[in-house]
Image: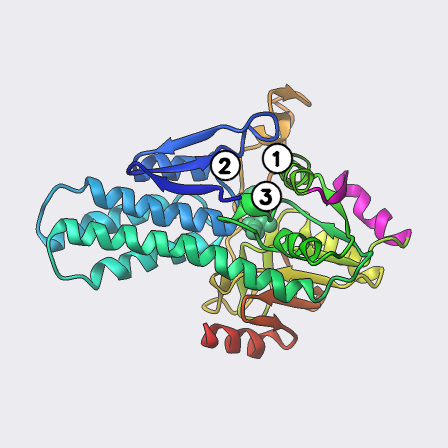
């Protein structure tokens, strides 16, 4: 399922806030609308927000009046700042903006040629995302055996990318290969990406699953029925420390204590070699209203004090391997990840 595309000079995407209740597609016409959609999580998931930002750059390029090249590039850089500022943790966002800027800077010609280059770069990134995820899914599916129960956090399926997804992409591939798998989906408080989005995707694919509350993951592993943990990533530091949805670290600790191999599935574009360790990753802090209320239902009084970090960092020592499109990186990650980035 392709979850976003360029149509009639707009970016069209499925509104993830309305799932699983309704399938609504929204049309975005400029970079400000794309930045707002990333911020309010109409679109979410690291690869998906990267590609959305690339299309945001293409939308900006179309609206810049015919001016000189320097002026055009200046306005493109301003659009890049708007998009980059929408969410801080997933490196794919800054990476995608930079890639479109590079494509535009490489063109010498009138404004419409530069705008064309921006759109071409964005479309190419969307198509590449699908191919990369398919390769990653094939690499990861080799870790999954017939009859396995997989534990998973957040949503990492087609909704979190353009198609296939990362960790859930591995599940889709294993299923397609005829392996019978069962997936335990952490609900993933506070926004319930696991219960709303991952369950919706697995249900459509006809894959066996159960949603569990986040706090039940340790129990499920301790009572012996989980074979492997698969999660995605928003940013992987050079030493393999991995930022992902809040609760991932707890899951990795429980996996370690119960001998369940814990794998991260992420494209090379999520690896940030400029960071030495996970301590340097900026963790987004979101509005506490997401905790007080869940999709219209008030859960506890709005004046109760809360803290709402959206991500956490799992230390590399808890990670059995990082599945990429170029193979599975293993410890020591500094060397294996650098090798994979160089190959890309
Ligand atoms: O806040 P979200 O829903 O954007 O967080 C998403 C995640 O943490 C995913 O696990 C991550 O982006 C990898 S998705 C392929």
Q: Give how far across and how far down residue 218 sits, in percent.
A: 82, 50
The numbered mark, 1 or 3, whose residue comes first in the sequence reads: 1
Instruction: Work out whether 266 lies above or below 164.
Output: below
10 Å neighbourhood of mark 1: few (<14), some, or many (≥20)? some
Q: Residue 249 vs residue 285: left or right?
A: right
Q: Residue at x 44, y 40 (%)?
A: 38
Q: Residue 216 vs residue 13: left or right?
A: right
The numbered mark, 2 or 3, whose residue comes first in the sequence reads: 2
Q: Nearer the viewer, mark 2 or mark 3?
A: 2
Q: Pointer 1: what residue?
A: 191
10 Å neighbourhood of mark 2: few (<14), some, or many (≥20)? some
Color encoding of the figure: rainbow
Helix, strand or loop status at disc 1: loop
Q: Residue at x 33, y 58 (%)?
A: 98
Helix, strand or loop status at disc 2: loop
Q: Give how far across and how far down residue 46 sits, in percent.
A: 51, 50
> In the figure, residue 304 lies in which quadrant?
top right
The label shown at residue 41 is: 2
Q: Pointer 3: what residue?
A: 309
Check if mark 1's residue and mark 2's residue have beta carbons within 8 Å. yes
Residue 89 appears in view: no
Is 220 colored magenta in this rendering?
A: yes
Tell me the quarter of the image containing the C terminus: bottom left
Helix, strand or loop status at disc 3: loop
10 Å neighbourhood of mark 3: few (<14), some, or many (≥20)? some
């Amino acid at each position: 399922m392709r979850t976003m595309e360029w149509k009639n000079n707009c970016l069209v995407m499925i509104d993830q806030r309305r799932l699983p209740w309704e399938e609504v597609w929204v049309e975005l016409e400029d970079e400000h609308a794309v930045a707002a959609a990333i911020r309010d999580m109409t679109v979410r998931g690291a690869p998906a927000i990267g590609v959305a930002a690339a299309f945001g750059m293409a939308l900006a390029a179309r609206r810049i009046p015919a001016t000189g090249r320097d002026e055009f590039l200046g306005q493109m850089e301003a659009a890049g700042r708007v998009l980059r500022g929408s969410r801080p943790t997933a490196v794919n966002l800054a990476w995608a903006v930079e890639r479109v800027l590079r494509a535009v800077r490489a063109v010498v010609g009138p404004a419409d040629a530069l705008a064309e280059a921006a759109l071409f770069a964005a479309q190419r990134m969307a198509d590449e995302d699908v191919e990369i995820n398919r390769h990653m899914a094939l690499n990861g599916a080799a870790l999954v055996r017939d009859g396995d129960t997989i534990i998973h956090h957040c949503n990492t399926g087609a909704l979190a990318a353009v198609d296939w997804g990362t960790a859930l992409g591995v599940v889709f591939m294993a299923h397609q290969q005829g392996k019978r798998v069962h997936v335990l989906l952490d609900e993933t408080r506070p926004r319930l990406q696991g219960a709303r989005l991952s369950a919706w995707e697995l249900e459509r694919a006809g894959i066996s699953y159960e949603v569990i509350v986040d706090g039940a993951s340790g129990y499920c592993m301790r009572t012996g029925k989980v074979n492997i943990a698969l999660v995605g990533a928003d940013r992987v530091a050079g030493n393999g420390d991995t930022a992902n949805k809040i609760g991932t670290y707890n899951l990795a600790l429980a996996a370690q204590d119960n001998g369940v191999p814990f794998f991260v599935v992420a494209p090379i574009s999520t690896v940030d070699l400029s960071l030495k360790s996970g301590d340097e990753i900026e963790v987004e802090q979101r509005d506490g209203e997401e905790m007080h209320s869940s999709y219209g239902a008030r859960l506890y009084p709005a004046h109760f004090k809360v803290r709402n970090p959206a991500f956490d960092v799992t230390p590399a020592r808890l990670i059995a391997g990082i599945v990429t499109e170029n193979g599975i990186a293993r410890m020591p990650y500094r060397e294996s990840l650098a090798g994979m980035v160089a190959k890309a």
